[in-house]
Image (spheres, rainbow, N blue to C red):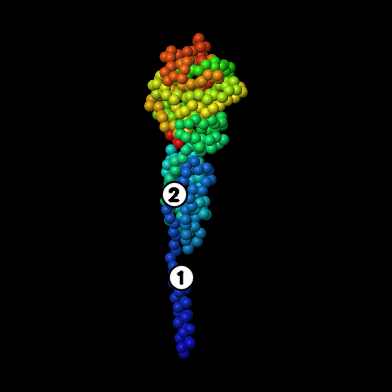
Amino acid sequence: MKKLKLGVLFSVLSLTIMSCSSDDPDSLTTANITKSIDENAADGTIVATVSGTSNAGNVSFSILNQTPAGAMTINAATGELTVADATIFDFETNPEITAEVQVSTENLIENSSVIINLNDIDDIEFLLSTSKNTYKNASDGNWVAITVAEYNNLEDKLNEVSRAGASEAEFNSTTASQEGGSSSFTVSKNNSGQLISKSVSPSKTATTTIPNGGYLIAFKYEVNPYGGAITDAKVKQSSTSNYSGFANIGGSLPSHTSTDADTFYFVLKGNTTATTAVGHMAFYKSSSNSTLFKRISGTSYYYSGSDSNILGSGAFDGGGTGIVWLQQGLCTTQKQW
């Protein structure tokens, strides 16, 4: 009789346990995400993974909305968020990127809030390639030699970039380049007819002044070093006029040489000196090398026969033929380093 009672008891317990298990409610859980990543993440970079756990079948994921639109895409099966548009992951433009993600099963829905904070990094260093390590190891205020490809990449990829000095059209003019003599002097382009208050035209060809609040970040010029090293070339900036109020920006350009006329390219690390009005660029060259110019109608320049921050107030135009020195700076109104 006892054996029978025990058997009945075990059967009742088993039925009770099975009944409780089958009566468990369907559940779906997820979690909000807040994390930080460096800006400039490439397309396809994994940003975060949204979680989703359920006892009611497969879980799927979809983005309900995001700001800015189109920043990320999500793997519907895994919840993995990846970069869809790398240009959006720019700290200066979008320091925070957010998304609302729907996590669902056939019958259940939960939402996950995603906040991605971008870390500000040195965009110039990020965009350099050949010269990256030299730039990284340089002190703030030093110029670093770079390649033409790096110069062009900075112009193309940094925000709000414009040109100061000779325009690209003047650099690329079919007019023959001429040598300007081997003595020391400082020159500035007479760009009084090309003043601007804010960058930048999409073509970037007409701008020859520094915008108000602009930072010089890169420089190129054409010179014939005659095989000797150039060690005392200086870039200058003024917020006063195109012939006065200049001051050196950074130290001297690093030593550079060539056996023939060549174009040299440089980037300035850590510039903290923005113009306080529409600005102008000047350039000082030491002796024993010859910077190049082109005779282009309507152009002129200001001049001093020494390393000077005040130039003569009368503009020279080469006797009416026009003269533009082949010297150009890149500048931006947005500090990205």
Question: Where residue 137 appears, x then y in whole percent?
Answer: 50, 37
Mark 2 element type: strand
Who's the residue at 44% across and 32% down the image?
271
Q: Which amino acid does label 2 sit on?
A: Lys
Q: In this view, does 42 lie to the left or right of 97?
A: right
Question: Where residue 3 appears, x then y in whole percent?
Answer: 48, 87
Question: Where residue 203 appears, x then y in whole percent?
Answer: 50, 27
**From mark 2 to mark 1, how far is it between C-alphas?**
38 Å
Question: Where residue 292 appears, x then y in whole percent?
Answer: 55, 19
Q: Which mark is residue 35?
A: 2
Which of these two is toward me, 4 or 82? Answer: 82
Q: What residue type is labelled 1?
A: Ser
Q: Which mark is residue 21?
A: 1
Crowd tier of the residue under label 1, counting other residues whose Cα lies within 10 Å: few below 14, some 14–19, many 20 or above: few
Q: In this view, does 203 lie above or below 290?
A: below
Number of marks in the rendered image? 2
